[in-house]
Amino acid sequence: ERQNRFVWKGILNNQKILFHIGDTGRLAELLFPWNEILIQKMPADGRKYPFRLIAAKGLQNKFILLNSLLHSALIREYL
């Protein structure tokens, strides 16, 4: 459940958590109850939310990156 443009409420290990969404797009096709997502635990260095959204499962059961900061880093590694 999306709380605002940057925050989503999800369930991890049967507990409700809040996590940061870097992409402010609508994302309704990817962020819906029971869809699988990948999140990253962030260091406790004054951040407002302890987790960051990385990817969500899309069509054909494949993960789609939703953190735009990772695209460049992955391409650099790949090349």
Image: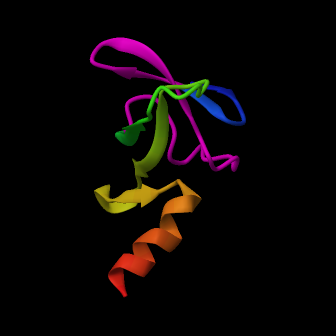
Residue for point 42% across, 48% down: 56
- The tally of labels here is 0
> Residue 23 at what x, y percent from top left?
64, 50
Q: Is residue 63 left or right of residue 30?
A: left
In the image, farthest residue toward the bottom:
79
Q: Residue furthest front?
A: 45
Q: Is residue 63 above or below residue 71?
A: above
In this view, the residue in front, 43 or 29, is: 43
Front residue of this view, candidates 42 and 4: 42
> At x 57% / y 60%, what residue is drawn?
68
Q: Which residues are magenta?
A: 9-35
Vertically, is 13 above or below 26? above
Q: Is residue 54 magenta?
A: no
Front residue (pair 42, 34) = 42
Q: Residue at x 30, y 13 (%)?
A: 14
Decide: is 40 above or below 63: above
Our reading of the magenta stretch's main secondary structure is: loop
In-image side of 38 versus 44 (left or right): left
Q: Quadrant of the C terminus?
A: bottom left
Quadrant including the N terminus: top right
Where in the figure is residue 54, as x and y percent of width and height? 45, 48
x and y, in percent, of residue 57 in the image = 38, 50
Quarter holding residue 59? bottom left
Q: Residue 38 at x, y = what percent?
A: 36, 43
Quarter of the image where one finds residue 16: top left
- Decide which of 36, 78 is in the foreground and name it: 78
